[in-house]
Image: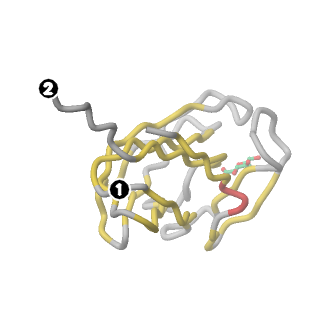
């Protein structure tokens, strides 16, 4: 299945700002979540068919404190308080991989901070959706 990447700076941002003052991001910047519960980034993504998809969130957390986020798909929390631990500094990025179920067509994926520290800095979300069905035998 094909992988599509969606920049955070192009997504819907609630209580966060696009910044570019740390190295290593892709696109034109990253999202710095406001330091509060409920700040989020929301992406509209497409899947060619319904079923399991692998999503990756690229993030940086230059503090020593976990910055958990709820991951919701189409309004339902599918991964509560997912950990986004320290990446040592704000120039270092790591990938958080999750498996979620998507509908065929358009889906909404939201990552919402669950602590007063807000979320980590987020660079992009990638989605690998659609199952390759092996051909049936003769
Ligand atoms: C620093 C850092 C930001 C980060 C913020 C935070 O200000 O430069 O990129 O988002 O800390 O703690 O959230």
Q: Secondary structure at mark 1?
A: loop
Q: Secondary structure at mark 2?
A: loop
Quarter residue 86 falls in: top right
Report the Cα–Cα distance between label 2 and label 1: 25 Å
x, y percent for residue 47: 43, 56
Quarter residue 49 falls in: bottom left
Q: Determine whether 102 is above or below 133 in the image.
A: below
Quarter of the image that includes the C terminus: top left
Left/right placement of residue 29 relative to residue 94 reads: right
Q: Establish whether ligand 1 lies closer than 8 Å to the Cβ of label 1.
A: no
x, y percent for residue 80: 31, 56
Task: Give the residue at mark 2.
Answer: 138
Quarter residue 48 falls in: bottom left
Binning the other alpha carbons within 10 Å of mark 1 as few (below 14), some (14 to 19) or many (20 upward) gives some
As rendered, which of 7 and 116 lies closer to the eye? 7
Task: Give the residue at mark 1.
Answer: 49
Q: Determine whether 76 is above or below 84 in the image.
A: below
Q: How many marks overall?
A: 2
Binning the other alpha carbons within 10 Å of mark 2 as few (below 14), some (14 to 19) or many (20 upward) gives few
x, y percent for residue 108: 46, 68
- Name which of mark 2 and mark 1 comes first in the sequence: 1
**Residue at 51% across / 62% down in the picture?**
116
Quarter of the image that includes the N terminus: top left
As rendered, which of 126 and 133 lies closer to the eye? 133
**Residue at 55% across / 59% down in the picture?**
118
Which residue extends farthest left? Answer: 138
């Amino acid at each position: 299945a094909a992988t599509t990447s969606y920049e955070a700076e192009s997504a819907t941002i609630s209580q966060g700002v696009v910044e570019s003052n740390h190295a290593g991001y892709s696109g034109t910047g990253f999202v710095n979540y406001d330091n509060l519960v409920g700040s989020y980034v929301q992406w509209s993504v497409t899947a060619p068919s319904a079923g399991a998809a692998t999503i990756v969130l690229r993030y940086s957390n230059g503090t020593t404190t976990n910055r958990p986020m709820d991951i919701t798909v189409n309004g339902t929390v599918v991964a509560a308080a997912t950990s986004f631990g320290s990446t040592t500094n704000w120039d270092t990025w790591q990938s958080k991989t999750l498996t979620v179920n998507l509908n065929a067509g358009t889906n909404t994926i939201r990552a919402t901070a669950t602590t007063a520290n807000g979320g980590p800095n987020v660079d992009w979300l990638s989605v690998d959706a659609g199952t390759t069905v092996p051909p049936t035998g003769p």
